[in-house]
């Protein structure tokens, strides 16, 4: 399995395993859902680049996590955002790839589009570095 798919799958599994996060969501999806009722989360774009050293095969994977909430204020969204980093930090290895670092790159919170605006959304970008250990 490619590093991109392994890291993506590991992150999705870790987020779904977080009971507090999932208690606040109607679902967590692999990709932007066509139909979903807020609040929900999804793992979106995934970009991989070469990373490693002389004796280490590695990949840097940039991953986007999105959260959508229908609330009037972003308060519930803040609690959900707070669950993302601990869940990602708990990810270890998946399909022969071991995640060695996970760093927040940026996050954005904004009103959802539409007329009138319908809630709030967050987009959180992470950089994860993984090394191949076989498997």
Image (cartoon, rainbow, N blue to C red):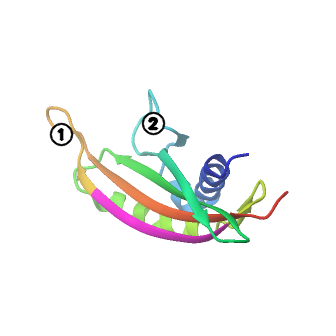
Residue 103 is inside the magenta segment? yes
Q: What crowding class fits label 1: few (fewer than 14 Cα within 10 Å), some (14-19), or many (20 or more)? A: few
Which residue appears farthest toward the top when viewing the image? 34
The majority secondary structure of the magenta stretch comes to strand
Q: Is residue 34 above or below residue 49?
A: above
Q: Mark 1 — residue?
A: 117
Q: Earlier in the sequence, mark 2 or mark 1?
A: 2
Q: Looking at the image, which is closer to me, 27 or 4?
A: 4
Q: Element type at marker 1?
A: loop
Estimate the x, y position of residue 32 in percent, counting from the top left. Answer: 45, 36
Would you identify the image quadrant in which residue 130 lies? bottom right
Instruction: Give the spatial CA distance, label 2 vs label 1.
Output: 19 Å
- Residue at figure coordinates x 33%, y 53% from the top left: 122
Q: Residues within 10 Å of mark 2 (few under 14, many from 20)?
A: some
Query: Residue 107, percent across and down?
Result: 33, 61
Above or below: residue 19 compared with residue 37: below
In the displayed orientation, state which residue is furthest to the left: 116
> In the image shown, does 50 or 116 lie closer to the viewer?
50
Taking the image as shown, residue 98 lies to the left or right of residue 84, namely right
Q: Which residue is mark 2?
A: 32
The residues colored magenta run 99-108
Q: Nearer the viewer, residue 5 or 65?
A: 5
Residue at the spot x=49%, y=66% of the render?
83
Residue 46 magenta-highlighted: no
Direction right: furthest residue: 135
């Amino acid at each position: 399995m490619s590093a991109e798919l392994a890291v993506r799958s590991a992150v999705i599994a870790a987020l779904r395993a977080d009971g507090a996060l999932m208690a606040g969501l109607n679902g967590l999806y692999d990709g932007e859902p066509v139909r979903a009722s807020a609040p929900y989360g999804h793992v979106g774009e995934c970009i991989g680049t070469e990373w490693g050293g002389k004796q280490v095969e590695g990949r840097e994977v940039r991953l986007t996590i999105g959260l959508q909430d229908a609330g009037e204020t972003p308060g519930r969204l803040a609690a959900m955002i707070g669950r993302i980093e601990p869940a990602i930090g708990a990810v270890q290895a998946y399909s022969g790839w071991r995640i060695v670092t996970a760093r927040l790159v940026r996050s954005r919170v904004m009103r959802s589009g539409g007329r009138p605006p319908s809630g709030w959304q967050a987009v959180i970008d992470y950089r994860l570095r993984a090394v191949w250990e076989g498997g």
